[in-house]
Image: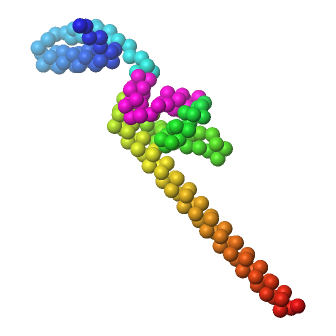
Amino acid sequence: ATVKNKPSTICGKIVSLSVFYNFAIYKGLLLANPFQMIAKPKVDKAKQAADNRATVAADVGVEHADALSAFAHGGDIDPKAGAELFKQGLVTTNDDGSYRMSPAGKQFLSAAEKGDKGAARDALATGKDTLGRAAEQEQARQERDKAKAEKQQSREKAKAERDTARAARVA
C-alpha cells in the first residue's frame, strides 16, 4: 500500500534533510546540498486550517465550528448555530440580541485552526465557566431586584397605613 503524505509533511521532511546536508557541508563532509534544488510543495494554509478546525471540533464536541469561523471573518450566523455556540460560551449576545465572539470563542477558533486540541478544550471550558458565572450573576441580580421591589412595596404599604391612620385621627 502506498502512503500519500500531505504537502506539509513532505515540506517538513525536505527542510529537515536540507538542514542535515547543510550541517554536513559545514563540517566539511560534503561539497553541495542535494536538497537545495528541490522545490517544496505549496501548502494550502486555508484548507489546512479548515481541516484542523473540523478535526478538532469533532473531537471536542463543537458542532458549528465552521459557522463560528465564518462569523469571525465577518459573516452572519444563523440563529440555531448562534444558540448552540452561546450555550458553549463561544459567542455572547449584545443588548439587541445579536451575537458577538467571546474571548473564549476567539481562543477556541485559533487553537482549532492550528490543530491544538488541548488548547481548544481549554478555551471551551473557559467559555462554559464564563457562561456559568454570567448566569449566576444574572440570577443574583434578579434576586437583588426582587428583594428591592419587595422592600419598596413594603415601604409603600407602611406609608399607606400611616396615611390611613393619620386620616382617621384627623377625622
Q: Could you tell me which residue is drawn at 32 percent across and 9 percent down?
A: 39
The chief SS type of the magenta part is: helix
The answer to whether residue 83 is above or below residue 158 is above
In the rendered image, residue 93, in percent from the top left (x then y), is placed at 59, 44
Magenta segment range?
49-75
Residue 29 in sight from this viewpoint: yes
In the rendered image, residue 161, in percent from the top left (x then y), is placed at 76, 82
Residue 49 in sight from this viewpoint: no
The answer to whether residue 114 is above or below residue 43 is below
Horizontal relation, residue 152 to residue 106: left or right = right
Residue farthest left in this picture: 29
In the rendered image, residue 109, in percent from the top left (x then y), is placed at 45, 33
The answer to whether residue 48 is above or below residue 32 is below
In the rendered image, residue 98, in percent from the top left (x then y), is placed at 63, 40
Please tell me which residue lies in front, 137 or 114. 137
Q: Is residue 61 magenta-colored? A: yes
How many marks the image carries: the answer is: 0
Please tell me which residue lies in front, 68 or 9. 68
